[in-house]
Image (spheres, grey):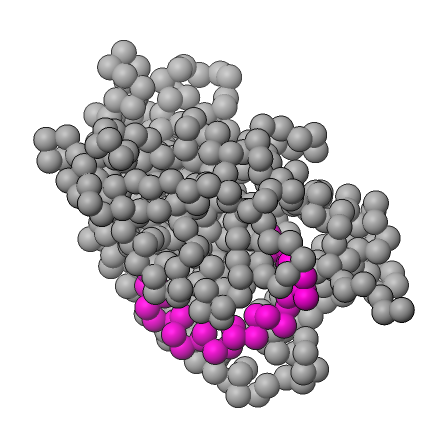
Amino acid sequence: MSSPPRKIGLLLGAGFSYDLGMPLAQELTEVLLKPITPRTAQELARAMTRARPYGADRPLNEPALLKCFEVLLSYKAAHGKNYEAMLAQIEDLARRPSGSQSDRDCAQYFSAVLYERIHDILSAYQAAAYEILYPKNFRWYANLGNLLSTQETWVFTLNHDLFLECLALDLKIPISYGDVASKEFPVSNLEMHERVRFSCIDRSQYTTASAGFLRDQPGINLVKLHGGLSEHDYDDKRTICNLDLTGKSSQELMAEYAKAARMAYYEHGVAAAAARDRFVTNLEGKCDLLGKAMLTGGYKYSTTANPKEGEEKLALLDHALGELDQLTVIGYGFGDKHVNFRLSHAMARREGLSIRIVDPHRHALPVFLEPFDYKSRVRSAVCGATLWMDYSKSNRWDAAHMESLKENASLREAVRMRAEAALRRGRPS
């Protein structure tokens, strides 16, 4: 009797999208901090005091805003490489019980402004990278199917970009967010005839048992653990909305993504603005609210393991790890405690689970996986994502492939330059 097919899962970090042009944490940190100088910090802090995000009776104060800018300037001077660690310092100021309410408001507002800037940076990179590097390197990602199971493959990604969706559509690999319903919004109350279609699911239904996920067939069940550029919250965060994936190609998806970026509600010809959220137009032509669902910073999830409202994705990860035989981890630096804990817990409770780490820069196991380094339960491949896609089936390294990837440096610089130019124009996507 033949053995049952192995259940395979993937965990993707920033390294997976590197050869498609998306920035690693160090590059994003550099782009974020590049415009910040002592002079611009003074000017921006003064300008920010004019904002009234919490009402006229809760004004912001310049010294507290300057303290937030000092965090950025100190991190820049120290050549810090992880913007999320820097964000955690700002978030700590917002949580500090000492100090005034105005001081905490300033740090909270500052965090929201940084969030918007990071979202804009990633949006600018998404647009530029799709134009410049995706066409060149698509052929090296064409063997993505080599990493997938003959059944459904659970793919957990920590990335915010849309490149896995683009690849699946262009490679004709079935893909699902697990959504079970749909919702449309007009682009704006000035363009009621133009619609953007989302697939949706209530958080209460968001489990591995969702009817929207693929079952007993090849394809990808995609879970964005940290949200994404095209993911939104709706109805007071009770509903998760994703750009619809029924298009025939990545071009259609990216066209919808660009259209979604224009979604707005206009009052007297001016788009209404909201920090971290988006005022949009509903089908009745009235103002509605969509929340950006990208998670970043030092407090994406709580520190304890018990299931909580809003942490359905982590619960889903726990459940899926309980069924997998093999998890391939690609381009993840193991910097998220809430993910690492669940990997360690799954390895401890299931002797049949193995982990393969694919990373061109990692030569040693993460400390939390060392207790499981026996019987080939944890193995490493010191290479990038696309090289592993080839090698995992052919057992040989492709010299032409490796040489082609070396040529990406100048194109990555072109992506960065175009993204920065778009940010200066105020048009990230």
- For image coordinates 27% across by 16% down, the residue present is 55
Instruction: Report whether 223 appears left or right of 237.
Output: right
Given residues 263 and 12, the one toward you in this image is: 263
Vertical relation: 377 (above or below) 241: below
- For image coordinates 30% across by 40% down, the residue present is 185
Q: Is residue 190 visible?
A: yes
In this view, the residue farthest toward the left is 268
**Label tally:** 0
What secondary structure predominates along the stretch shown in magenta? Answer: helix
- For image coordinates 42% across by 42% down, the residue present is 182
* Screen quadrant of the C terminus: bottom left
In this view, the residue farthest toward the bottom is 400
Given residues 262 and 69, the one toward you in this image is: 262
Task: Residue 197: give x, y in percent of width and height.
Answer: 35, 47
In this view, the residue farthest toward the top is 57
- For image coordinates 20% across by 45% down, the residue present is 193
Q: Is residue 224 visible?
A: no
Vertical relation: 35 (above or below) 142: above
Instruction: Report whether 349 appears left or right of 256.
Output: right
> Is residue 142 on the magenta stretch?
yes
Vertical relation: 102 (above or below) 370: above
Instruction: Report whether 19 appears left or right of 306.
Output: left
Residue 341, quarter of picture = top right
Residue 191, quarter of picture = top left
Task: Residue 395: give x, y in percent of width and height.
Answer: 70, 82
Task: Residue 34: give x, y in percent of width and height.
Answer: 33, 52
Vertical relation: 149 (above or below) 429: below
Task: Residue 422: give x, y in percent of width and height.
Answer: 25, 56
> Is residue 94 on the magenta stretch?
no
* Screen quadrant of the N terminus: bottom right
> What is the magenta range?
127-156
